[in-house]
Amino acid sequence: KAGVTQTPRYLIKTRGQQVTLSCSPISGHRSVSWYQQTPGQGLQFLFEYFSETQRNKGNFPGRFSGRQFSNSRSEMNVSTLELGDSALYLCASTTRGAGETQYFGPGTRLLVL
Amino acid sequence: GQQVMQIPQYQHVQEGEDFTTYCNSSTTLSNIQWYKQRPGGHPVFLIQLVKSGEVKKQKRLTFQFGEAKKNSSLHITATQTTDVGTYFCAGPSSGGSYIPTFGRGTSLIVHP
């Protein structure tokens, strides 16, 4: 099976812009979770989508949002970018939920200038 | 909220030496997962422990889950340069909604 794919792999934006990241899970996986990884805060859970519904949400501001499509592909959006949003954004898929083994994609490295 | 602490943050070893990282949760965990992230890479699942006192081995890696299910350890025997990376533990949050909490990780540096 193909692994989790994420696009784009690298992105440079300026403060105030918005960005949309995409994640395609492993075939047959219905749950997609998003994480933000920074040197200072480590791996932090953003949200989880299952069957097109947000099922769990971490402690991030409303500027961070996401959605999932009927084919389980997911997107996350960050509006009004801040310098502190510079990070590696990882998505992970599982068959049923975030409590299972997480299969991570390669990530999107976002730099906000 | 639940906290998962990992120590040490960094560990330098000479190739061939052993390495251990420890993971401690503020709450009892139903299970614990371990991941490895190579430099520039993404986390890759290593193992999941579920039972109290469980010990699992993968070649030179030994994973333990504490009796109280609040702590865990990963021990690598005779490290190799291929072991370089950051090792994370992760456990489910308490209180119903399943949000995995990751430790900050232990970065292993192996000197040849």
Image (cartoon, rainbow, N blue to C red):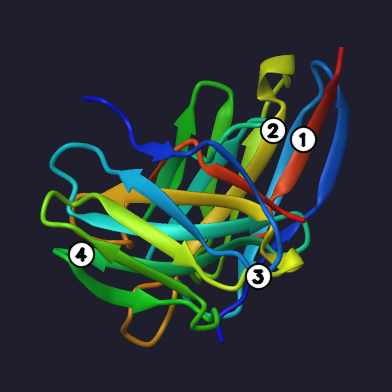
Q: CA distance from mark 2 to mark 1?
A: 5 Å
**Tag 3 subunit:** A
Q: CA distance from mark 4 to mark 1?
A: 35 Å
Residue B16 against residue B94 in the figure, above or below: above
| Front-most of residues B34 and A43 | A43
Q: CA distance from mark 3 to mark 4?
A: 30 Å
Q: Position of residue A99 (x, y in %)?
A: 32, 62
- Amino acid type, label 1: Leu
**Tag 1 subunit:** B
Label 3 vs label 4, nearer the camera = 3
Instruction: From the image, tell me which residue sits under label 4.
Output: A50
Label 3 close to label 2 by CB (< 8 Å): no
Quadrant where the image shows the C terminus of chain B: top right
Label 2 close to label 1 by CB (< 8 Å): yes
Label 3 vs label 1, nearer the camera = 3
Q: CA distance from mark 2 to mark 4?
A: 31 Å
Q: Position of residue B111 (x, y in %)?
A: 88, 19
Residue B51 seen by the camera: no
Instruction: From the image, tell me which residue sits under label 2.
Output: B85
Label 3 vs label 2, nearer the camera = 3
Residue B11 against residue B1 in the figure, above or below: above
Mark 2 Cα-neighbour bin, 10 Å: few <14, some 14–19, many ≥20: many
- Amino acid type, label 4: Phe
Instruction: From the image, tell me which residue sits under label 1.
Output: B108
Q: Earlier in the sequence, mark 3 or mark 4?
A: 3
Q: Residue at x 41, y 39 (%)?
A: A6
| Front-most of residues B88 and B29 | B88
* B45 to the left or right of A31: right
Mark 4 Cα-neighbour bin, 10 Å: few <14, some 14–19, many ≥20: many
Q: Quadrant of residue B100?
A: bottom left
Instruction: From the image, tell me which residue sits under label 3.
Output: A16
Residue A67 against residue A72 in the figure, above or below: below
